[in-house]
Image (cartoon, helix red, strand yellow):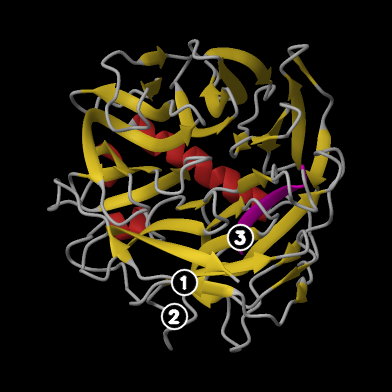
Amino acid sequence: MGTRSKICISGFLFVLLGCLGKAQTSPEFVNLDSSKDILPGKNVAIPSQLETYPLVEPTIISHQNDNNHLLAAAMVVTDINDPYQSCRLSSFVSKDGGKTWKETAHNYWGYDPWVALLPNGKAALSWLGTPNSFKGQFPLVIFTSNDGGENWDSSVEVFSGLGHGHDGTKLVGHKDAFYLTTVQFNTNMGADVVLYESKNNVSFKKVATIDGQGRRLNFCEPAILTNGRVVVPTMHGQGKIWTNIYNPKTQEMSERYVVSHNPKLGRGYARMASDVGAQSKFTDRIYFVRAVADGSSSQGVWLNYSMDQGKTWTSEKRIDLFNNGRPSKANVPSVAVNKDGVVGISWVDGQHSDDQKSYDVYFSISKDGGERFQRPVRITEVSSNPRTEDNADVANKFIGGGHYLGLTAKPDGSFQLIWSDSRTGMFKLQTCNVKIK
């Protein structure tokens, strides 16, 4: 059994324990906003020079001041019968708003890409793995670029960690700083959540650790507030979900603030985003999203949010307001907030096909800070069943197109989605711009 298998089993047990924790009442749905303000554009295929392989687990970020500049990354599965041992890294940059893309095929093998962009054009790309071939080792690797991802520096930063290294990377950027969270395994196969910082163009350094005390912790991306403080989320399947807040000025981490005593997960990574819009009515509100399952039964997309910069949180509510009577198949949610404070949440679901074996990407918004959401709008123009001959075991490992998909807000207030679907018979990247009335 390879290292990744051990890590994945550990992750599975974490999810299972979350689902078997103390009994919880399923949350109510949020209130409905009956407006129809979501205007999806055309689906645009993102081509790859590695066209004979499936591409999965994409992430995307928009430049904070340039509406045309987008940066994305994804995993390329080079062996469809052994996907966990055969993924390499590609990044993609667009300078025309997502119409055309330039790919960089990085000769690095492993998992979990993530990207971030600063206003000055500095880009960072995080990855777990090794150069030249898959070696079953998972150091944290950080690539940087001074031109927004068109050209990457030849030198990379590598953090080896302890035990089996790391599992997962989540990278965000704001003003002059990047912040990255990851799980770092220790020698006892427990796992701590660690926070890395890079400010003013200097190298990344570890600035805080949330000690798992022998337990296997989990995490999602941090949220940066307008005062520069960093909200770091942590989850444990037998306990709770909480945040600690890192203050870069004092280099201190706050006490623990509980998000939820209901630690259920089960359908991809949880996600977090903050509202940093200067003209928003909800500046510094933070949103935490997850797709939840009890065993094989999906429980939809859940939202908690904080109105006081991460100290207290609302109880979770479901935001997947379908009205067709079909059960939820929700998977891999994402969340972003635009300049006007509009919250956008995307996810994959089986609502468009009668047998619910084919999947689509859906998108919903809230214009009042998470109180009400509009009916989900189908973004994909073609439904697709991932279980194809060309996907083989990739469909079992990445049923939703990855353990996460990508969503970002652009400077004009629109949202850009990226996902992987099987409309061609093989997982390939698609993107779509969604405008808001």
Closer-to-camera residue (384/173): 173
Q: Does residue 426 lie above or below 358 as drawn?
A: above
Q: Is residue 390 left or right of residue 65?
A: left
The amino acid marked with disc number 1 is Pro
**Disc 3 residue crowd, few under 14, some 14–19, many 20+, Cα 10 Å:** many
Q: Is residue 354 left or right of residue 43?
A: right
Instruction: Tell me residue 155's x, y (percent).
Output: 30, 13
Q: Earlier in the sequence, mark 1 or mark 3?
A: 1
Query: Which image quadrant: the C terminus?
Result: bottom right
Q: Quadrant of residue 310?
A: top right
Whether residue 356 is visible, yes or no, is yes
Instruction: Please give the residue where the numbered disc 2 appears in the rendered image.
Output: 356
Q: Does residue 248 lie above or below 360 as drawn?
A: above
Task: Give the residue at x 39% y 72%.
Answer: 380
Q: Look at the image and say whether residue 290 sits in the magenta stretch.
A: yes
The amino acid marked with disc number 2 is Gln
**Disc 2 residue crowd, few under 14, some 14–19, many 20+, Cα 10 Å:** some
Residue range (magenta): 284-293
Secondary structure mostly seen in the magenta stretch: strand
Instruction: Please give the residue where the numbered disc 1 appears in the rendered image.
Output: 40
Closest to the camera, between mark 3 and mark 2, is 3
Instruction: Tell me residue 113's x, y (percent).
Output: 39, 37
Instruction: Please give the residue where the numbered disc 3 appears in the rendered image.
Output: 344
Q: Quadrant of residue 215?
A: top right
Determine the secondary structure under disc 1: strand
Closest to the camera, between mark 1 and mark 3, is 1
- Measure how far apart labels 1 and 2 are at the Cα level: 22 Å
Closest to the camera, between mark 1 and mark 2, is 1
Q: Quadrant of residue 225?
A: top right
Q: Earlier in the sequence, mark 3 or mark 2?
A: 3
The amino acid marked with disc number 3 is Gly
Closer-to-camera residue (312/364): 364
